[in-house]
Image (cartoon, rainbow, N blue to C red):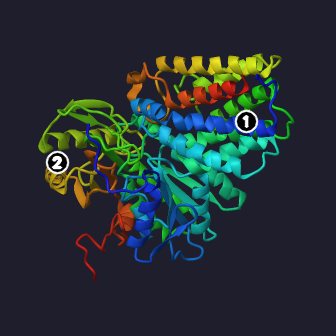
Amino acid sequence: MPKESLNSAEVRDMMLAVADKIIEAEPILSEADRQLGDGDHGIGMERGMNAVKEKLTSEEPDDIGKVFMNTGMAMMSSMGGASGAIFGTVFRAGGKAIKGCEAFTAAEAATFFQAACEGVKERGGAKPGDKTMVDSLQPAAEKAAEVTDQPLPAAMAAIADAAEAGKEASKDMIATMGRAKTLGEKSVGKADAGACSVAIIVATMRDFVA
Amino acid sequence: MSVQKKLINDPLKVADELVEGLIEAYNGEVRMVGTRSVVKNSIPDGKVALLVGGGSGHEPIYHGLVGRNLADGAACGDIFAAPPPNIVFEATEAVNKGNGVLYLYGNYAGDVMNFDIGAEMAEDEDIDVRTVLIADDVCSAPPTEKDKRRGIAGLVPIVKIVGAASQKAPNLDELEKVAKKAVLETRSVGVSMSPGSIPATGKPTFEIEADKIGLGMGIHGEPGVGEIPMSTADELTPQMLDMIIEDFEKDDDVEALKEGDDIVLIVNSLGATTMMELLICLRKAKDYFNSRGINIHDVVVGPLVTCQEMTGISFSVTRVDDVLKKFWNMPCQSLCYTKMTGRYGDLS
């Protein structure tokens, strides 16, 4: 049954689904990172998402923004590393921007993704084209801003397509940030592990509302 | 490739369990604080505090550099991952004695982001924090972009010098100055012959052909800047040291290393490379510097900054003038590095 809007309990259930999906994808994410970095991205994300599940099931989801912020805080404090700071910032900054909202619709999704993307760029200094997770998150945020008048399932489908296309486009980019930058042109042909995580997160959100 | 045999328990608890053991190894000198920080028990009131930290899995650093005349505390991350901001903050609160805290750690994106968020949390509590990044790996960026360089084994002489300086530093400004100078005068080059593996997955962090050496390989197993054919100790050692000398020459911010200069030389194993090999390389390094009239003031040899069972070696050079030499010569004691007074351990 497609969902036109989500309440706080449904947002929590969506994030629990995201957590399960990321945990399941650990070997894929670790392998992606092993091609370009040190190969621990999947492990870190798995640890973060286990902490998210513990946090989100331990308290009543009274506010949609807070569900996302709790997700971010749980990731940040359990993961460490660049991934912890970056993915923690995605949900903390995104959640903060929609704190107090009554329902999660395409409009809130747009606000969420834009704030998340700005927060990440400010914290990590990455620009589009640097072959980082921003290359998946930024197209998702831009698409989200274009589809605010659509029903949530259609909007999330468009946002997920943009995130996936962004991840694919990162394959052709040369890494200039993080541990992959020493690879230079050797980094071409492989997708950034963080961009893979973003694509999985957004696709799971799409599947949840579909 | 077969999976490395590692004596561990739950792969996800490796960092927590190793830090528990580390605390025990200190015989009561340090304690565990918060989630995973190692903090000295006796930090005098009013001392300018020195906090180090980074990912675990590179033992004996960073947590092994907490000690007498060394760091006051370490914020410990998971294996190869920066410590999260809450751990940085917990460590900061614990080492703070009212005169500010200097953060001194390796220049990695994850560490910078997490320490910065930790510093923001500390500033909310009115704790004065300053950061100096260790960026000694000459292979990771040209001299004109030193702010992009990674921190590798040069962190040992840097933390040694700054730890000594912190004992008497009147304020955070003065300690920051010493730290910046120590960083500027320290340069390293590393190579790797085979990878270490991630404890949680058992997988190697990179691949390299059996007859190749990765030049400029990072301590997390980041691929190097190039591969060269497998070599001998006597061929490789001058090749690596040339890169350090050239870097001092090319960098407008420092003078070239010249005849009459005093240096501290670190010969580091990345984990599996043996003391035998390090000593053979040191023998060649001695000839190298002697022939240039550069005086090796002191040498440290051993596995100090490691990446599990990675085979590889790195050389670090810190040029010490009278000021830095004074700090270097002070005795110190920690799990990673212990030094008696003076060059020969003279106890008088």
Same chain for mark 1 and mark 2? The answer is: no
Camera-side mark, 1 or 2:
1
**Please, which residue is most extreme toward the bottom here?**
B348
Based on the displayed image, in which of its 4 quarters is residue B249 positioned? top left
Based on the displayed image, in which of its 4 quarters is residue B193 positioned? top left
- Crowding near pointer 1: few (<14 within 10 Å), some, many (20+)? many
x then y, percent, for residue B265: 27, 55
x then y, percent, for residue B235: 14, 39
x then y, percent, for residue A27: 45, 34
Locate the N terminus of chain B and report the quarter of the image it occupies: top left
Q: Amino acid at mark 2?
A: Tyr
Q: Secondary structure at mark 2?
A: helix
The residue wearing badge 2 is B288
**Residue lying at 41% horizontally and 61% vertically, measured from the top left:** B18
Seen in the picture, residue B219 relative to A111 is either above or below; the reply is below
Residue B88 visible, this orientation: yes
x then y, percent, for residue B256: 32, 44
Badge 2: chain ID: B
**Please, which residue is most extreme toward the front here?**
A1
Residue A124 visible, this orientation: no
Seen in the picture, residue B231 relative to B345 is either above or below; the reply is above
Q: Nearer the viewer, residue A125 or A119?
A: A119
**Residue lying at 68% horizontally and 28% vertically, measured from the top left:** A205
The residue wearing badge 1 is A94
